[in-house]
Image (tube, rainbow, N blue to C red):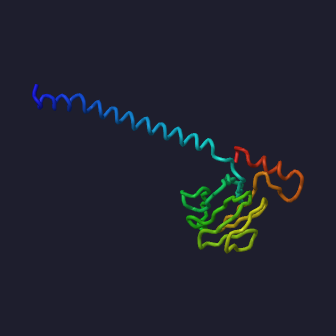
Amino acid sequence: MGWRELYALAVRYLLPTIMAAVLLRVMFITAREWRAARRARDLTPPPIGSLTDDAGRQYALGHDSVLGRSRRCDIVLSDAGVAGVHAQIYERRRTVFLQPLARGKVFLNGAALSGRAKLQSGDTVGLGETALTVRLCGRDQGGDEAGPAKAESQCGTDV
């Protein structure tokens, strides 16, 4: 058997076998990455609160949420007065902050915001024509004794 016959056999049988093995390996790696991403999603911390707009729509507030009109934002608002990436709400050391990210105005309780500001339950955040009411989980809402329990009920999986 000459080298041409060996080459023909390799191309005919060995090459498809190698390609099948590589394809199976890629599928295995993809499945493993998918399972790892699913586990990471399951380990995502619960929301720190919620935002409610004037129409009653609720948005879950993560530990680092970006608000804007862009589909890449965590909280997408359909207001024409809102920039693509307008503001960020984030938590650091159990304190929640609001940070403007665009030139568009950000209002906190009716006052224009130029830098970051601390958020509390019951605050109103204004972006464009949209007013969002802040509810934070496990934090006192106005000093009444039912506040934390009331906040916890708003932070379940239904948000």
Residue ranking furthest to the top = 1
> For this view, does 111 lie left or right of residue 77?
right
Q: Residue at x 32, y 32 (%)?
A: 20
Question: Furthest residue to the left?
Answer: 2
Q: Residue furthest right?
A: 145
Q: Residue at x 29, y 33 (%)?
A: 18
- The answer to whether 73 is drawn above or below residue 114 in the figure is above
Corner quadrant of residue 118: bottom right
- Residue drawn at point x = 70 percent, y = 57 percent: 51
Residue 148, given in percent of the width and then of the height, sits at 83, 51
Q: Quadrant of residue 43?
A: top right
Which residue is rendered at x = 41% and y = 36% of the image?
Answer: 27
Q: Position of residue 42 (x, y in %)?
A: 62, 41
**From the viewer's perspective, is residue 107 above or below residue 5?**
below
Left-right relation of 2 to 79: left
Farthest front residue in view: 2
| Quadrant hosting residue 106 | bottom right
Q: Can you say which quadrant of the picture contains the N terminus?
A: top left
Horizontal arrangement in the rendering, residue 49 relative to residue 40 (left or right)? right
User: Residue 14 in the image: x percent, y percent?
Assistant: 24, 30
